[in-house]
Amino acid sequence: MGDEPAWLRAHGRPWTRGEGRVVYDNPWIRVTEYAATAPTGQPATYGLVSYKNFAVAVLPLFDDGTTVLVGQHRFPLATYSWEIPEGGGPLADDPLASAQRELAEETGLQAAKWREVLRAELSNSVSDERAIGYLALGLSPATGAAHADDTEALELARVPFRQALDAAMAGQLTDVLTVAMLLKAYHMAREGLLAPALARAMIG
């Protein structure tokens, strides 16, 4: 990427990893404590949370400018959260296949057209979790019934895209991938990167 602006390039020395010790491990995450050296040269102890899955996020867009949100209770912050369809896909698997599975399982939908529109690092000061976001277009009922994970009790709401975006901007939707994907889709609609009829239906 030789045409990138200079400010995007790396500056200074990187972190140096020394010996690591696994302090926790389960099927989803591993926590490793490293003896490290900071870019300043100072020694440090660094705890790294390594994820065994990609995070995949899907923004389904109907031709009438509506989308589908999934409601569920989230354990870490003890909150109820409305989000776009999301889940995890094993690192060795095709992320698109994982996204297609999540859309079908959580919403009972399939899409004729998929567009990868987002790559994100979700908490890069403490974890290596990476996310990939897709637009799902040309929606129709999926073959077979939707079935959530056996720990998930999900609710679905089909809402106007602009209503979802406004809720995110008001702080009523707080899941970071949901906010990021709604903003990315809005940007694409405004910049002529989506079909004109769909863009008009989304933003009015």
Image (cartoon, rainbow, N blue to C red):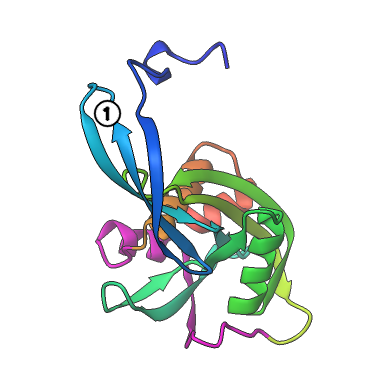
In this rendering, is residue 6 above or below 94? above
The residue located at (54%, 58%) in the rendering is: 52
Which residue is at the front of the view, 192 or 177?
A: 177
Among the 4 quarters of the image, the one containing residue 165: bottom left
Q: Position of residue 63 (x, y in %)?
A: 63, 62
Point out the stretch of residues depicted in magenta: 146-174
Can the viewer see residue 174? yes
Among the 4 quarters of the image, the one containing residue 44 = top left
Location of residue 147 with respect to 21 vertically, above or below: below
Residue at which label 1 appears: 38
Residue 149 in picture, x, y percent from top left: 57, 82
Q: In the rendered structure, which amino acid carries the disc numbered 1?
A: Ala
Q: Residue at x 58, y 77 (%)?
A: 106
User: Which image quadrant is residue 88 in?
Assistant: bottom right
Relative depth, front residue between 106 and 151: 151
In percent of the image, x 47 and y 45: which residue is there? 120
